[in-house]
Image (tube, coloured by chain):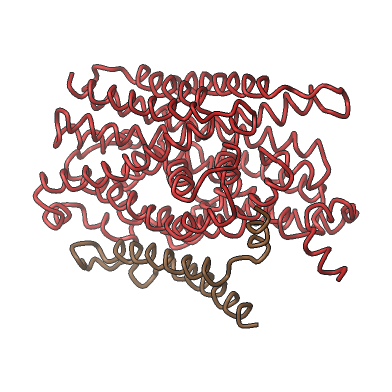
Chain colours: A red, B brown
Amino acid sequence: MIVITVIFAYLGLVLIVGTVSHKFFRGTGEDYFVASRTIGPFVLLMSLFGTNMTAFSILGASGEAYHRGIGVFALMASSTALIAPCVFFFVGTRLWAIGKRHGYFTQVQYFRERWDSNGLGLLLFVVIVALIVPYLLIGVMGGGITLHQITKGQIPQWLGGLLVCAVVFIYVCYGGVRGTAWANTFQTLVFMTLGGATFFIIVHKMGGLSASLAKAAPDLLIQKVHIKPLELLTYTCIPLSVGMFPHIFMHWLTAKSAGTFRYPVMLYPICVAIVWIPSVLLGILGSVDVPGLKGPEANSVLVQMIQRHAPGALAGLLGAGVFAAIMSSLDSQSLSIGSMFTHDIVRYYRFRPESTKTEMSEKGQVLVGRLFVFGILCLTYLLSLVLNRSIFKLAVWSFTGFASLFPIVLAALFWKRSTKYGAFASVISVVVLWIYFFIQGWQAPGYTVGGTGIMPVAIILGVSAVVMIIGSLISKPPDPTVIQKFFPSEVKTADS
Amino acid sequence: MRKTSSRWILYIALVVLFLFHNDFWFWDSPRMVLRLPIGLLYHIGYCVAAAVLMALTINHAWPSHLQDEDTDE
């Protein structure tokens, strides 16, 4: 009972933080979706990090380390520690500048105008929404698993998932992206602190780190047995997904200035290490403490260990840390999808200024955004009731799709000669190959291309890049006015 | 000139650090250092190296057009 009380108290706190931000709400669509571009460096770091670290990094990482050992840290954490800040630096800052200059809210708005193509915008919209659903799912599933386990089954999994969705909906609906950023900051601090506390408490109860690691199977303490060299190499493509995540794009746009990105770029790798070291080590120790878990059952190893070693109020607090990680992603993801539906579909197709004289009111934008957040959370919740997959693998398939779209954003930002035909061909190649590999690998645990260790993402990404280049080169060069719009400084330099 | 060269050095350093991610030298080493498996400790160090390099990059290779955007504020 005390566990439930603590978790409900935590959820209440999150609601308070999220809804207090409503006092600063200016009543405009720009404020609801990008916080009027006023977010400072600390909140930007916390919201980018909190958004990117989800049930995947806490439950998924420990569950995967349970089966595959220390190599999981190399596969996802250290590669993310380098690649994600590089993407923030080279891509995020530029997208922020373009978004601010042209008043964008979503990626689709940018790509649509960058290549002057409505069709491309619509295609990208469909692909991005389809890819984000599995990512949303892992949050809802993670919430359900956590609450079910930590309350010893008193709260069923379906109710846990429902609770997560309800809390997220309330503060996203009320506070918009500012509420989301504030709640993310609070929750990121909570899960970083409580994650560390969980680690030290459990390790202490198990007799210390050296003693407990000595009991682990030796194959979990080296990389060779469970990870192929090519798998490690090609896994480094996965973190490129941050360049195409709609929720990361949304948070980039909230930055107050380009300089706001400096601290997030610099401190992101440290934050990654702080969260992933305990997750991976606890997963390995879990194989000693809670042996015999098969496949996706290992997703719950961390919660089972908390339950075993830190009962009572402490379990509630530690469970709240897991909840914090889950909700800090779910909120941004659902809001970004709400923003896309509002701007890229409803506002664009029904209220285009050139076809009608009526622009959607600010109040209308906010209302539609809220309705879509509600819709997407309902859909995700219903899907979570019928699916039972490994959180790690579910997320990796979602990341594979987003990472494979990375050449699109790279070409848009850095290659003036890129065309809409190249972009079309690239997106279609991603869709076709992703479906192909998904069918091949969905039922096969540890699937790599032909058993070589090569992750499907490397193949899809490579093909997508090549197709982008060839498609652009064989099609007509883009209109000079479009180039001038998106590369003004270079045109200015050439003129002078 | 000096700024451009330091920028390229840092960009190359990022590529080199990327290559060092594939730590085949600790691939099957069971050694424990600082109470941690060496393979894990290496990658923790890697995260720290990434933070240091990113700090250098933002200080010495911050894109000039972004400085213009900030000045426009």
> Whole-percent x and y of residue A430?
67, 45
User: In what quadrant of the picture does the N terminus of chain A appear?
Assistant: top left
Identified at 84% across, 28% down, the residue is: A353
Examine the rendered structure and indicate whether residue A343 appears above or below residue A212. above
Q: Quadrant of residue A299?
A: top left
Identified at 58% across, 70% down, the residue is: B61
Count of number-bearing discs? 0
> Whole-percent x and y of residue B16?
50, 73
A451, A174: nearer the viewer: A174
Examine the rendered structure and indicate whether residue A390 appears above or below residue B46. above
> Whole-percent x and y of residue A359?
78, 24
Residue A452 seen from this side: no
> Whole-percent x and y of residue A57?
38, 44
Residue A211 seen from this side: yes
Identified at 68% across, 32% down, the residue is: A126
Q: Is residue A224 left or right of residue B32?
A: right
Q: Is residue A283 left or right of residue A350?
A: left
Identified at 80% across, 58% down, the residue is: A488
A310, A7: nearer the viewer: A7
A198, A495: nearer the viewer: A495
